[in-house]
Amino acid sequence: MSHDPLQTGQARYAWREIDRREPPKRKAEERITDFHEIYSLFDEAMIREQASRCVQCVSPACVTGCPLGNRIPEWIALAAEGRFLEAAEISRRTSSMPEICPRVCPQERLCEDACVIHSPEEPVCIGAIEKFINEYALASGNGHIATAPRNGLRVAVVGSGPGGLACADELSRMGYTVTVYESQLLPGGLLLFGIPAFKLDKAVVERRINILKQQGVEFKVGVTLGKDVSLSGLLENHQAVFLGIGALKPKALDVPGADLQGVIQGLPFLAQKNAPIALDLPPVDVNGRRVVVLGGGDSAMDCLRTAIRCGAAEVVCAYRRDLANMPGSRKEYANALEEGARFLFLTNPLAIEGNGDGNVTGVRCVRMELGEPDASGRRKPRPVAGSEFQIPADLVLVAYGFDPVPFPPGSDLARIAVNDWGATKVDQNQMTSVPGVFAGGDVVRGPSLVVHAVRDGRRAAAGIHRYLTELKPSPAPAQP
Ligand SMILES: Cc1cc2nc3c(=O)[nH]c(=O)nc-3n(C[C@H](O)[C@H](O)[C@H](O)COP(=O)(O)OP(=O)(O)OC[C@H]3O[C@@H](n4cnc5c(N)ncnc54)[C@H](O)[C@@H]3O)c2cc1C
């Protein structure tokens, strides 16, 4: 059957008649009482109608707008015809997480931003369609698990975030025997221990990991590279190694009072409140407390919304730039606002204030104004003289982003070249300076997106395959 929308009778100008719809979203009053996902799926009729808004561009900008180069118009055309299983089959050819990316991608900055009907109209709801077709296929038990005859070659994947999982997926589909080494007691990386369950249900991550297990991927959890195993030890038993160990060193809050009780890093807070297992972290009581979140990225949005769900009396975000320059997803910003978060833009902390017991009582701030663009192209904030004020607070969550964890000096990991801010250097095949050792995701890019880690993991798998089949190196020498 043809997929051509013109031949199938799909209206090419349907977008003029049919408005974009957002998938059903639970009311804010209801959703702040639990950690369940806030969006549900469209029904089949609505998916077909929304998919019919796609104009099937000859040079689809949405494909280039997607870091994975997802074949969006093809699966949208199939979805418009109600051929959901075929649509899902095409969608998973380019993505190792086609049910996870639509839940967490900032589509408004990627595929949907590139959609040609974005201007003058609203773009096609690409993310909602991708989620629907893949949930449909998963519910029908269709596809997703791909097994291939083993090729006798072994690869170690270190780190089980989206980068490591995508690399393991691709390699196992090619016949490699893959073992994933993960320092946490559950695999998933930030999908499990960072991104809150109201954005990404933990059962969805578990289901994806189970698919990999059924594909033959082995998981060894509670194993830390550089402590329990060495790089040379892995290279003795595997023909290649992929490092997907993320960038998990939180940036510090560098103001007086940052060591007061009640000032804590956002990521351990999120992990404690969202992880599906109890973690060995000091408990943080949020109930009835006034919470100030410092930062303006995805982690900050997640801290705000998690604090609200934990019963905070008041939740305020202080961010030094304005909304236009805030890195966090607009969709999640809107959700945070709906749920009761308050935003103070152009606001920078000068000091954390405390009482005689060493507990936080507030954040002394200064108003900012935007000056000239800095190296990143964003306008640099500068303080406004005489504009100091205080935000009362019992708990301050620091969400300033992350850096790669430095490789332990003296360990054999230290021979991997890094750039001046500690990110691992890779070539066009994602190979590091050490032959046979590849890397991708946040450890290479710094804090980024799930979809970028997936792309790197897939690209590294192709690089590993090329390295092991075309370059045919002799096995790495065992280290003493
Ligand atoms: C709070 C928060 C919210 C976010 N929200 C979004 C979002 O909504 N959308 C989006 O696209 N992105 C989001 N991101 C970013 C996204 O989660 C990351 O870009 C992505 O997870 C990076 O994937 P990764 O595989 O490189 O690393 P990670 O997901 O960080 O996984 C790295 C894994 O390696 C393990 N590890 C580290 N060192 C070792 C070692 N030595 N030995 C063994 N294992 C090791 C870690 O335990 C971890 O499991 C968010 C990030 C945070 C922190």
Image (spheres, rainbow, N blue to C red):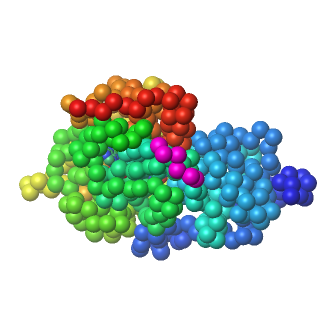
- Please tell me which residue lies in front, 28 or 225: 225
Q: Residue at x 16, y 47 (%)?
A: 259
Closer to us: 227 or 61: 227
User: How many tags in the picture?
Assistant: 0
Taking the image as shown, residue 459 lies to the left or right of residue 62, namely left
Q: Give me the residue at 69% from left, 44% from top.
A: 62
Asked whether residue 28 is drawn in magenta, I would say no
Whether 312 is drawn above or below 166: the answer is below
Question: Magenta span: helix, strand or loop, mainly?
Answer: loop
Horizontal side, residue 388 vs residue 447: left or right: left
In the image, residue 61 above or below residue 423: below
The answer to whether residue 196 of the structure is visible from this angle is: yes
Q: Determine the residue positioned at 63% across, 47% down.
A: 94
Q: In which quarter of the view is residue 22 placed?
A: bottom right
| Residue 372 screen position, x and y as percent | 46, 25
Residue 209 in picture, x, y percent from top left: 46, 60
Q: Magenta residues? A: 148-153
Residue 464: % across, % down: 50, 36
